[in-house]
Image (spheres, helix red, strand yellow):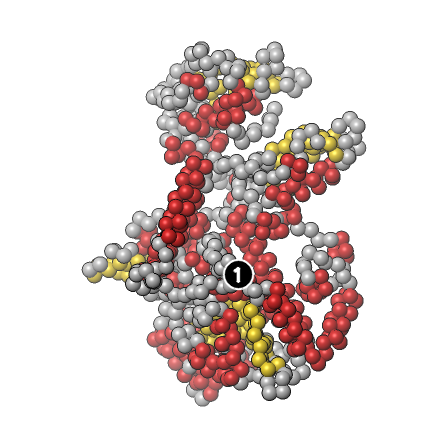
Amino acid sequence: MATEDDSSFNFMGAMGLCQGDMDCSKAPETSMPPSGSMNEPEWGDGLKPCIGMTFDSWEDGEEFYKAYAERVGFSVRTWTQLKGGDGALLWKRYVCTREGFRKGNKRVITGANKPKRNRKLTRCGCEAMIGFKRNADGKYEVARFVESHTHELLSASQRQLIKSSREGLNYVPDCDDRLKPLSGMTFNSWEEGEKLYKVYADHVGFSVRTSTQSKDCGGVALWKRYVCTREGFRKGKQLEVTGENKRKRNRKLTRCGCEAMIAFKRKANGTYEVARFIEAHRHELVRPSKKRSEKSNREVSSEMKGTLLGTPEIFNLLNSEKGEQRNIGCTNVDLQNQRCGIQKAIKESDCQVFINIMKKKQSFNSEFFFDYQLDEKGMVKHIFWADGSCRKNYTLFGDVISFYSTCDTNQHGPIITLFTGVNHHNTCVTFGAGYLADNRIQSCTWLCQAFLKAMGGVAPKVVITNEDPSMECAIRDVFQTTKHRLCTWKILMKLSDKVGPMLNSNTQFSNRIRACVLGSETPEEFELKWSSIISEFGLENNAWLTEKYNMRQTWIPAYFHDLSLGRILQTTSRLESENAFFGHFNNQQPVLLEFWVRFQTAVEEQQRTELCNDNATLCMLPMLQSPWSIESHGREVYTNEIFKLFQDEVIAARDSCDVKSMAQLGEIRITGISDDSGKIKTVQYNTCTKIAQCSCRLFESVGIPCSHIIVVLKGEKCNEIPSHYIMQRWTKMATWINIFGSNMHMLEGSRTSLPPTITRLYSESCSKFNSGIDVAKQCEKKMRYLHKAISDAVDHVMQMGPISEYNGRQV
């Protein structure tokens, strides 16, 4: 009969339980194994199980033996047990996991019906074991103890791999005892108990799900059990991504064997009592700022479930009326009345009302930036605004930005411009918004200057816009060091209107023109393909195509593959998501104030998405697809979304890449590598600096190592991604940077370009910190040592005073 196997234990607590009862003067009773060398654990006689040692319960004995097993280097499993007629446990035996041998029929890898998993042989006939027997007084005594093993024990550095104890540290929530559902507490119903436990879970930072329950014949719950959502492990069959019949979703691994739980038992008087409560967790708890993203802490009200409104309309009305997304509750009539009321109230004075609101917001929030300009008649000409989150986003991810112009928002035809980019989860973020009365060069110049002022005078490295001569001139005048490129997909979207209906319906033409524009790796390859298409389809006299060819350096990716991160915004998904995201909040000619309300809602939605992605990166590990250590290191460093991109490159390196040639020229090793494209990519690897460059230029344009570089690194025995290839903007620690000072003003130079030497040292320091913190968090002693070392180093750096960033002299 199976029982619960509670593998969490506290070694010192287990020692204290048996201190007064154990008799360690007796020699252990052992049996010699039939074959193999003997391995005696090196462990003090006073700290190992002895015949006659007694425990208050078999659980205490189990905890003590597992603590002993972990420290000498082997894993434990339950073997056999016997219960009496009343269900009381009479005896129980635990053995080393390498006890016995695998049965003969289990060695067959394939059968008649389906293939079986090719499991490794782990059992070797080890006879190490312990047996507990129940005494007349109800306590449990060590009746038999076999100490010797027939295999080598794990070293101290390998003991974290022990299955019966590898769940990790216990994380005990820091919580007031008055909020804890302690054992013995009673409730009028199990619903009350569930509510209390969920409130407690929300307070300390974890999510709850129902585990098991038992009901009587009348349907009344006799007992009910709730657990942490990270309880248990995913079953073996569920780990397989593909099956014989269908492809399964590649879900993230969230369960880690956490044993935090609560159990309610129904008493004779109909109330429910807390029968068991396990407080400690096997994982880090969610920080207060991310608690709202936990699944069990999210709930849709009953009023909202019955409404006919769509989600965007609900969120819009929520912001305009209530100010917060959790205060939801309205009808379609309420929404229409609210919108009509806003439009009627502001009518012709919408710009002035908007300015008044902006000024008031700026007076209460020093992080909020707002600027505007009036014309000769005192009417509003230009407006720009960016709150603290937008400015922080720019400081972190503003190396590449996009200017996106929306439709007109009022009768006099103003233009709304959005400044957007991509964060460390590869999702869109907003840097600010502008309002222009017209699209003249002077207006666009003012907008760029306002944006630059809001962002501390730091210009972006790359700007991507639509075709707009006025904006092009403004960018050239204001962002003098910035590279300006046009959106490739916006130009391709116009192709169907420029070539006529016949070619527009020609699938071959469409595929070839897109392959030419998007698939060419060099300018020479593009020009050859373009010339062939123009000649074959008779488009020599097409003025629009001729114009686009003459400006090819501004929109064809082959001409800026080496442009830093130039491709991260040049995607259809990015364009469509941006259009849909802000277009949804910008329907039929809303007034400026209404657009701002909807704009704020859109920004809040981005923040909510980032919060959920941060929480997913913290709690969910993507499944590895290869045994390569460099893939595992990528999972530790990158966010989940970026790791997907890196993992694709790893799989391509494993399955599709083949080394075709290799040559050595001094310090440079040149390797030719083929892939699925049928082209040979050239990787130049500097054996001194350990830096590789590939002709595909993926790292330069996207920021992650390509499959060809990974092949070379694998050949150089690199088990981790070199720090040179780890861009801070794609890592889990991308947002761990202080942007605002103590006065909440943006720090000067927080995104200023650094010399190459400092950039390399900065990247290496971040990588070492990531690796160190991952190792140290498994041990309190190591964590305290690392904390002291970092504190001492920071104090020393602060005492050094300001250092010139170029010549190293104190200034």
Q: Nearer the viewer, residue 678 or 59?
A: 59
Placement of 162 over or under 283, stated as above or below: above
Placement of 707 over or under 229, stated as above or below: below
Label 1 sits on a secondary structure element that is loop
Image location of residue 20, percent across then percent down: 52, 15
In the picture, measured across the screen, residue 322 lies left or right of residue 407, that is right
Q: Nearer the viewer, residue 208 or 202?
A: 202
Number of marks: 1
Image point 56% across, 69% down: which residue? 369
Q: Which residue is mark 1?
A: 744
Image point 44% across, 20% down: which residue? 47
**Amino acid type, callout 1:** Met
Q: Nearer the viewer, residue 165 or 604?
A: 604
Mark 1 is surrounded, within 10 Å at the Cα level, by few (under 14), some (14 to 19) or many (20 or more) other residues, namely few
Placement of 173 over or under 451, stated as above or below: above
Please identify the quarter of the rendering in which residue 358 is found. Answer: bottom right
Image location of residue 57, percent across then percent down: 58, 20
Q: State whether residue 644 appears in this view.
A: no
State the quadrant of the N terminus. Answer: top right
State the quadrant of the C terminus. Answer: bottom left
Image point 52% across, 77% down: which residue? 447
Image point 42% across, 57% down: which residue? 728
Image location of residue 262, percent across then percent down: 65, 34
Image location of residue 469, percent across then percent down: 49, 83
Placement of 703 over or under 785, stated as above or below: below
In the picture, measured across the screen, residue 251 lies left or right of residue 317, that is left
Please identify the quarter of the rendering in which residue 8 is found. Answer: top right
Q: State whether residue 133 appears in this view.
A: yes
